[in-house]
Structure formats: C-alpha cells, structure tokens
Amino acid sequence: VQLQASGGGLVQDGDSLRLSCAVSGATVGRYTVGWFRQAPGKNREIVGGISWSGSRIYYADSVKGRFTISRDNAKNTVFLQMNSLKPEDTAVYYCAVGLWSTDVVMLSSAIYSHWGQGTLVTVSS
C-alpha cells in the first residue's frame, strides 16, 4: 500500500487549503483513512478520519466545523478540506491507512499501518 499526500503550502490566517491523499495497492473502499498532523516540537495528533464506507467521519475538536474529510473511492483518493485556517494549524499533515475489517475510525496513530510522506501546511498570521 502506498500513499501520496499533496496540497500543502503557505497561506494566510483565514485562508483555505485542500489536501489530497492518493492511495494505491489497497482494495478500493476497504480501508479507513486517518489524517494526522505534527507541529514543530509537538506530538503527532489526529485531525480526523473517514471509514471505508464514508459513513463514519471523526474530527478532532480543534478542527470541527472548519475541516471536512471526504473520499472518492472511484479515484482511491481522500480529501481534507481545511477552511478558516489558523496559525496553530501549522504542521506537517500526514494521511494514513488502516486495514481493519470494521467500518470505523480509530483514533490512535499506532494502529494505522501505512503512512504517506507528509505535506507541510504553514499558516501565517
């Protein structure tokens, strides 16, 4: 399984970005995708995730109402739409795949088996 994250960049406070995570090598629709981020000097934290059917979506409280996760199984791609970005959203963002059999989102990064390379999002004030 390989993941390719893209879409990061430098934006200003209040701007929007859309990150993409292209997944290859996994059965279409049969994996959960989590989005995580790691800011300088901080631990990696979950941003959100979407189950393989798309029926279950989780958002961290810090991004709820601003970020939206969606998936296009026809293109094997998951998106993270980030609106109203804040300087505290600055981090390297990672997508990760979990291959468990249940249609749920797991919150722990430790159980996601495959990771993309990360894409840097910088929000200036």
Image (cartoon, helix red, strand yellow):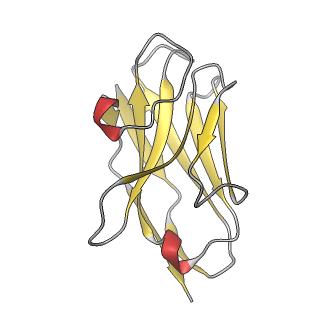
Q: Position of residue 10 (x, y in %)?
A: 51, 77
Instruction: Give whichever of 22, 94 is nearer the camera.
Output: 94
In the rendered image, the quadrant that contains the N terminus is: top left
The reply, left or right, for residue 72 in relation to residue 22 is right
Q: Residue at x 56, y 51 (%)?
A: 60
Count of labels shown? 0
Instruction: Give whichever of 13, 48 is nearer the camera.
Output: 48
Q: Residue at x 48, y 38 (%)?
A: 34
Residue at the farthest right position: 65
Q: Is residue 112 above or below residue 68?
A: above
In the rendered image, the quadrant that contains the C terminus is: bottom right
Q: Residue at x 50, y 75 (%)?
A: 88
Residue at the farthest front position: 61
Q: Position of residue 20 (x, y in %)?
A: 55, 47
Q: Is residue 46 above or below residue 125?
A: above
Q: Is residue 122 above or below residue 52?
A: below
Residue at the farthest top position: 101
Q: Position of residue 38 (x, y in %)?
A: 36, 61
Q: Is residue 15 above or below residue 45?
A: below
Q: Position of residue 46 (x, y in %)?
A: 45, 48
Q: Residue at x 46, y 10 (%)?
A: 101
Residue at the farthest bottom position: 125
